[in-house]
Image (cartoon, grey):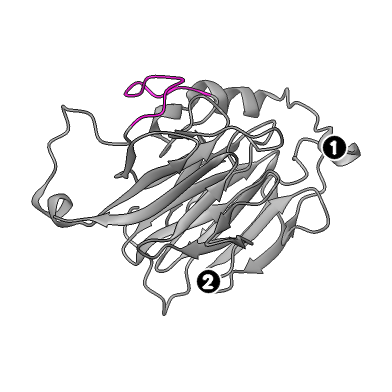
Amino acid sequence: MPTLTLSLKNKFVKAYKLKKGVALTIGRRQDNYIVIDDPAVSGHHAKIDDLGERLVLTDLQSKNGSFVNEQLVHSQWLKDEDVITIGEHSLLLNYDLKEQAPADGVDDFDETQAMNTTQHRKMMIKSNPTKSINVVRFWDQNQNRGKVRNVEPSASETPTDDQAREPVGTLDYLDGGVGQVKLTRKITTIGTDPTSDIVIKGLLMDPTAATINKTPEGFCFNYIGGRPRPKINDEPVKGSTFLAVSDIIQIGSSRLQFSIEDQ
């Protein structure tokens, strides 16, 4: 498995070995796998999921954002030698030489100080949020805000033969909505934020409560935050789990059934 090397202003702090199949969190709280003692870092700032052969970084609605190679992201596939910037710290991702890297692809802790450094402002200006897989709280030029919608490529995007042969996951509303959602994006976001791909209701649900990641191994449901926890087939989701046909997801006030569309 790859290694993450934590540095502060180019000075080595600590190296972390990732564990296969295990999600890890990054933040200021002591219950994170990678703890960064920095007031500009949120209590639970970001997480990295191991989804088979690939890693994905997800920002956990942090106050100052997460960056990959100086680009502001919400969710981003990671590759060898990517640099993740969180606060004033950086994490360098490196795969072992023997391992083939994947192809491009409320308490005091919650009172996070907003960053106002020159480097942070430069990254915000330089960053193009539309390069993120999906950018909640910012914008997406190909989506209409505030609507439950089918998550599909824009009409101008012609699918390749390989894309046409890929399985298409679907979610059918059983409660809390009407219609069907197609899971054609690499990462589909679910939450109360009106720019989420699937908008849900719930008093204590997070703006981004969960994501569904499309991977070569299947569709992986990832719990991010909010209460109560989502359930799959009446079992609370603790982290990440691959979906099976006919699984029923209960999240917020919505119940959805997963299936694979016939090609």
Q: Main secondary structure of the magenta part?
A: loop
Residue at x 80%, y 59% (from the top left corner) = 31
Q: Is residue 57 magenta?
A: no
Image quadrant where residue 3 sits: bottom right
Note whether residue 139 is visible: yes
Relative depth, front residue between 236 and 145: 236
Relative depth, front residue between 32 and 198: 198
Q: Is residue 97 above or below residue 7?
A: below
Q: Is residue 140 magenta?
A: yes
What residue did someone put label 2 on?
Answer: 21
What residue did someone put label 1 on?
Answer: 106
Magenta residue span: 138-149
Name the kind of residue labelled 1 in the image.
Val
Measured from the top left, where is residue 262 in percent x and y? 17, 56
Q: Quadrant of the C terminus?
A: bottom left
Residue at x 38%, y 54% (from the top left corner) = 258
Name the kind of residue labelled 2 in the image.
Gly
Say which of marks 1 and 2 sits in front: 1
Image quadrant where residue 214 sits: bottom left
SS of the residue under disc 1: loop
Residue at x 84%, y 32% (from the top left corner) = 111
Residue 112 shown left or right of residue 149 in the figure: right
Assess disc 1: are there few (<14), some (14-19) or many (≥20) residues with their C-alpha within 10 Å of its C-alpha.
Answer: few
